[in-house]
């Protein structure tokens, strides 16, 4: 009975945005966010050790295919066997990969390691399901936004710390030191999940006789994507377009800023820190506005305003211009993700959230990988600004689909 008691206690705390589970996930993510410097400087390091923008895109795409294999498994586990175990176990597995990155002898091994690390995505559906389960529907966007702000606030200083390491020790040694620090932080971030996280999935009927493996296979086929409600289906496709847009440019911001504009690694770290600070300041009021005036409206405005901002970025010719365009871009785009996650929760029954989150993650991870491949090819073969033009077209398509096909539900799922 302790399993049932934990779930009951979590439900009683649902009047508050920050339940025990939400606090555990936010604290864990906040500690892990301190190691964000690894992702910021990874593209530069990868090219430094012999890779190219195209091979970086290829490895990113390959990693997304691995994620496609493991996300459905994660969805089955989350909905059939519980959320907590998979979240905690993968948090501890994540400790080892930064150490491997630090000792990778060349770009080929480094790329293979990033592909192996993609297996960690198996816990993503469970994590999203716990967040959705733990926040009351009427406060969902505000709650998700608050978790995201707490989770990312430490990352404001992370890029500058990484830039300082690179400045002091050079790109290769500085990056390797950052990886060691990231491994320590990954271990510390797993502890709040181990100590505080409670299960949110109701225990299944013990009289059920279907074998677990058979249950898992059947769960994989239910629900079919094409049988989903039209609004939920369109919402997932729209998000995939946004993911493709971001995948097309995410690895290449720093490449463009360094090779075209002439910024140093420390300069770019400062830009990213300012972006993260702006996002933390703007997200919570943005989430409140989304809950009050409509999630679809907030998402549409966010998508449409990112288009001119990304084009302004490509016209930047100095550090100040890059800072201004980067801050305008994050101001425009920061409201989309929490509103989308909340609207998806509104449309998805609790018992299906693991599998729906898996379907959402599968489409978005594949789209990010494909975007990275397209962006890497475009950057190398067509010119540095072209991936950013691809971003603008994809964002416009996502906005049009959202406007025409998605409707907010009259009754939100709990």
Image (cartoon, rainbow, N blue to C red):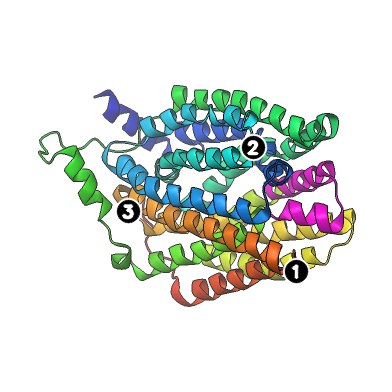
Task: Identify residue for label 3.
Answer: 349
Residue 231 versus residue 346 in the image, above or below: below
In this image, 194 relative to 313: left or right? Answer: left
Residue 313, image x, y percentages: 78, 63
Mark 3 vs mark 1: which is more N-terminal?
Answer: 1
Local crowd size for mark 1, using a 10 Å CA cut-off: few (<14), some (14–19), many (≥20)? some
Q: Which residues are magenta?
A: 252-280
**Residue at x-position 78% and y-position 43%:** 269
Q: Nearer the viewer, residue 68 or 324?
A: 68
Mark 2 vs mark 1: which is more N-terminal?
Answer: 2
Task: Identify residue for label 2.
Answer: 106
- Residue 11: image quadrant is top left
**Label placed on residue 275:** none
**Label placed on residue 311:** 1
Q: Nearer the viewer, residue 96 or 353?
A: 96
Between disc 3 and disc 1, the foreground one is: 1
Mark 2 vs mark 3: which is more N-terminal?
Answer: 2
Contact between marks 3 and 1 (CB within 8 A): the answer is no
**Disc 3 to disc 1, C-alpha distance:** 39 Å
Contact between marks 2 and 1 (CB within 8 A): the answer is no
Q: Secondary structure at mark 2?
A: loop
Q: Secondary structure at mark 3?
A: loop
Residue 122, image x, y percentages: 41, 41
């Amino acid at each position: 009975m302790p399993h049932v008691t934990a779930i009951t206690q979590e439900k009683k705390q649902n009047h508050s945005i920050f339940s025990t589970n939400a606090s555990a996930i936010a604290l864990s993510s906040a500690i892990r966010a301190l190691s964000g410097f690894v992702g910021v400087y990874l593209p530069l390091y990868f090219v430094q050790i012999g890779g190219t923008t195209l091979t970086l895109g290829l490895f990113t795409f390959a990693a997304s295919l691995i994620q496609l294999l493991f996300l459905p498994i994660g969805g089955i586990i989350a909905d059939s066997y519980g959320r907590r175990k998979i979240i905690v176990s993968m948090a501890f597995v994540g400790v080892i990969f930064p150490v491997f990155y630090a000792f990778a002898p060349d770009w080929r091994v480094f790329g293979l390691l990033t592909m192996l690390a993609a297996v960690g995505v198996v816990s993503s559906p469970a994590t999203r399901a716990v967040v959705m389960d733990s926040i009351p529907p009427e406060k969902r966007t505000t709650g998700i936004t608050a978790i995201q702000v707490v989770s990312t606030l430490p990352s404001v200083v992370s890029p500058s710390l990484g830039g300082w390491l690179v400045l002091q020790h050079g790109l290769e040694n500085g990056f390797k030191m950052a990886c060691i620090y990231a491994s320590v932080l990954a271990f510390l971030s797993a502890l709040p999940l181990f100590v505080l996280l409670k299960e949110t999935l109701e225990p299944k009927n013990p009289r059920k006789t279907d074998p677990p493996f058979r249950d898992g296979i059947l769960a994989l086929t239910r629900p079919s994507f094409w049988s989903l409600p039209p609004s939920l289906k369109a919402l997932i496709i729209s998000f995939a377009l946004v993911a493709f847009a971001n995948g097309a440019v995410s690895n290449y911001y720093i490449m463009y800023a360094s090779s075209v504009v002439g910024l140093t690694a420390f300069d770019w770290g400062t830009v990213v820190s300012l972006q993260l600070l702006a996002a933390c300041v703007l997200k919570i009021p943005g989430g409140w506005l989304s809950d009050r005036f409509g999630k679809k409206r907030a998402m549409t405005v966010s998508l449409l305003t990112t288009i001119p901002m990304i084009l302004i970025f490509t016209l930047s010719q100095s550090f100040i211009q890059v800072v201004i365009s980067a801050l305008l871009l994050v101001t425009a785009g920061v409201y989309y993700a929490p509103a989308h996650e909340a609207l998806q929760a509104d449309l998805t029954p609790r018992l299906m959230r693991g599998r729906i989150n898996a379907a959402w993650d599968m489409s978005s991870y594949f789209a990010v990988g494909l975007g990275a491949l397209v962006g890497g090819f475009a950057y190398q073969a067509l010119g540095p600004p072209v991936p950013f033009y691809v971003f603008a077209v994809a964002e416009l398509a996502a906005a049009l689909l959202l406007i025409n096909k998605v409707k907010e539900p009259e009754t939100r799922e709990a």
